[in-house]
Image (cartoon, rainbow, N blue to C red):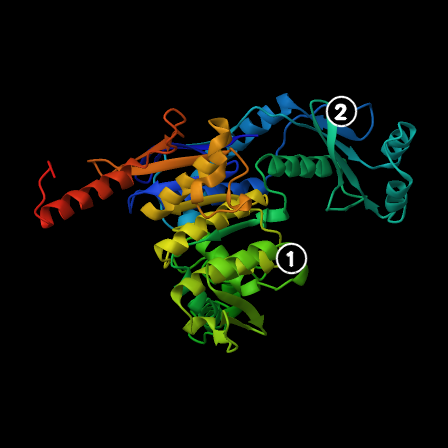
Amino acid sequence: MDLYIRVKNFGKIRHARVNISNFTIFVGNNNSGKTQLMELIYAVMKRVSEMSPAIEVPQIGGVDAFSIGEREIEALNQWVNQDLNNQIYDIIEKTFNAPIGIEEIELEFGKADCSYEIYLLTDQTVADLTRRNMLSVEELTRIVQNKKKLWVLQIEKQNGRTVKKSYSSKVYFKYFPKNFIKTMEIGSVLSQLVGITSPNASDLLFLPASRMGLMLLYKYYFKNQNQVWEDLVWADDLEPGVESWDLYDEPDSGILEDGSYENVTGITKPVLDFLSFLQTYNYTERTAQKNKKLIDFIFGHLIDGTITEKGDATVYTPKGGKKEIPVFVASSMVNEIVPVIKALTCSQKIDYIFYDEVETSMHPLKQMEMVKMLNRFNNQGIRLLVSTHSETMAAKINNLLLLSYSDQIDDTQNGNRGIRTRPEDLLVSRQIHVYQFRNDREDQSMVEELEFQKVPYTGYDFRLFNDSTMDLWKEAKQAMGMDDED
């Protein structure tokens, strides 16, 4: 299902309508709003993952079950937009720590090609499903073994045919009100519709620009946050009548009741989430083995070495070398890649990566390898929203897309004509959207979606980069004393 976000007069962006379903690329000028829009999209998706929509859904067969079809999905879309418009200023404040202006915001669900059936597995529902041969012996055993909990069965259908059958990862206590459980399950379906499969959107990862500096300093940041809180709690110069522990619940104390850190330093919430990801990162061999091909590609084509975890330290070993180097003394490019390796080896499943200024600290040759990496990520099912200022990145993205889609035009182009690529470097999905940000004369940003040109077969027209290339060529001609006829 296509998913769009639309904003009007957000910061310096006049208007933007962006498809965030699968693979989205932002290109454009500095200070044109790319990062701000990326952070807003991240914040909106996080909020949607926490929603429990109160909408009416039809009951199935007189048992504790309900269905969500096209009409209900449309109602969910309306409910989400009403919530966003009611809470947008609060969302902006919590995300950016600043009152950034915004006139309109809206999520647009494309035409739904799926429907859902949700069964609360009470005794009555289990009996009904058993009678209809919808539960196997193994499934019944699983339900009966935990009589104190209430299982939920979700069936996803496309064109009336079952494509996925799963039990809720959340097992409810039986004394929970059924309406509460139903609302929670509707929220779970909503998260799936926008592509969030983990509780509290833990499968989203935001990789901000300046990753090297954040990598080097994040431990000191949290240490300082702890010290700020301790100073507040144990302050002995409090005003009369104020107990020291009264400060614990103050919004600027820094630590919340669940032990997480509140954003009191002025950095944006997506960046704070990135720091928290680094702080709580836990290497998991199972995840590393699953992503071994991606990791090996990065080691062999991007950083020319390996990155490993040694206790609390991350170390880099150059190709052909034996000496392990702490990453903080390795090259900036290696440091930029470390968060990506952590994402591929962490305990949580990462399904959506927001990758700001993806080419940072990379030589143009490595930037071309980075495009291959992004394609491989997406081919493995990881959704991407990336931004770049690099002409090299843009050109390589275009070239690989031309090769990926060449069968639409002429099968003879599939030989790759000597271009060094492997089949896995080419993008499988045709669902990629490229947006160009351009500052106008009033210093506001215009966001336009670039069209992939099939006739002539030239792909994307990155005019912003083409203009700067032509300017450099004109300067070079003048410097060499060449005139236009030459």
Locate the N terminus by quadrant.
Answer: top right
User: Residue 127 versus residue 285: which sits nearer the camera?
Assistant: 285
Q: Which residue is tagged 2?
A: 59
Asked whether the viewer can see residue 94, the reply is no
Image quarter for residue 126? top right
Q: Position of residue 146 (x, y in %)?
A: 86, 49
Q: Badge 2: how crowded within 10 Å, few (<14), some, or many (20+)?
A: some
In this rendering, position of residue 36 left or right of residue 305: left
Q: Badge 1: how crowded within 10 Å, few (<14), some, or many (20+)?
A: some
- Amino acid, disc 1: Thr
User: Residue 365 versus residue 180: which sits nearer the camera?
Assistant: 365
Asked whether the viewer can see residue 449, the reply is yes
Locate the C terminus by quadrant.
Answer: top left
The secondary element bearing badge 2 is classed as loop
What is the spatial separation of the Cα atoms under label 1 and label 2, in whole angstroms?
Answer: 39 Å
User: Residue 88 versus residue 313: which sits nearer the camera?
Assistant: 313
**Mark 1 or mark 2: which is in front?**
1
Reply above or below: 112 against 354: above
Residue at x 11% of width, y 49% of height = 480
Q: Which residue is tagged 1?
A: 287
Mark 1 and mark 2 residues within 8 Å of each other at the beta carbon: no
